[in-house]
Image (cartoon, helix red, strand yellow):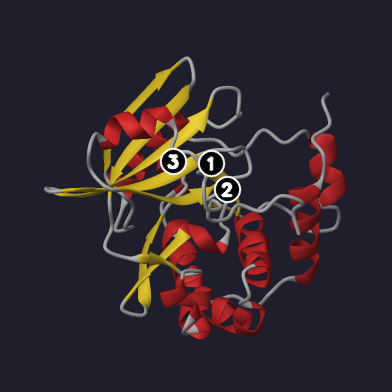
Amino acid sequence: MPSVVAAPPPAGTPVPRAIARLAEHHPVELVWRNETGGITARIDRPNGSVYAKWSPAGSGESLADEAERMRWLAQAGPLPVPRVLDQASDAAGETLVTAAIDAASIVSAAGLRDPERAAAALGEGLRCLHALPVADCPFPAPDWTASTLDSAADGAGPDDLVVCHGDPCAPNTLLASGRFAGLVDLGRVGVGDRWSDLAIASWSLEWNGLADAEPAFWRAYGVVPDAARIAGWRALWDAPIVDD
């Protein structure tokens, strides 16, 4: 399990200035804070709700990259992702504004009421993403060093390449009416090993109180768990990056 886990921000968390400017006088609800200090907020406007994501300068996260990937995914196939409305940057950081999807995270109160359906939605979402044609994806896998990759995934076998999410933790899957409804937090999408997503997605069920529902995840995805690959990719997830 990672040492820092993304979660809803605690009460009293200040609204980033960039989000406050976007909201103007409309209601703002802070809904998520990630490991690098980025904030996601819901803004309820008269013409429809939007989500504004802010990432501080120097965080290592690129919302411009995420917007590019979301636009590509929107036209790549029948995979529900939020529609990009705006992306900008200034000295303090970057912002990304997307249209709201009428759905909730599988780790929301609504999602946790039915753990089996929540876990199944996670599996279904990755199955849909991984079905996209690899040859059409213009984005590479994360730039892990060869030495770290070889050490962490030793014995896992050759790569099984698909279009990967890159951060497939349970909160990044949306659920509506008990079914998969969308994927979010898409800044790391790229061609990679199928098991890099599956190992972390299944692990994240444990972090979010859904460990007992893990079999539903594997059934929905449609594959038998591979213990060697799972162990290798989980080790890599927590391994320090070693420079060449």
Q: Nearer the viewer, mark 1 or mark 3?
A: 1
Does the rendering let one see residue 138?
no
In the picture as drawn, the residue positioned furthest to the top comes out as: 91
Name the mark on residue 137. Answer: 3
What is the spatial separation of the Cα atoms under label 1 and label 3, in whole angstroms? Answer: 12 Å
Question: Cβ–Cβ below 8 Å for labels 2 and 1?
Answer: yes
Q: Residue at x 52, y 44 (%)?
A: 13
Q: Which residue is mark 2?
A: 166
Task: Report the quarter where the C terminus lies.
Answer: top right
Name the mark on residue 51. Answer: none
- Callout 1 secondary element: loop
Question: Cβ–Cβ below 8 Å for labels 1 and 3?
Answer: no
Task: Report the quarter where the N terminus lies.
Answer: bottom right
What is the spatial separation of the Cα atoms under label 2 and label 1, in whole angstroms? Answer: 5 Å
- Callout 3 secondary element: loop
The numbered mark, 1 or 3, whose residue comes first in the sequence reads: 3
Q: Number of callouts in the render?
A: 3
Q: Residue at x 59, y 75 (%)?
A: 223
Q: What x and y, as percent, mark residue 131?
A: 43, 59
Q: Is residue 177 left or right of residue 172?
A: left
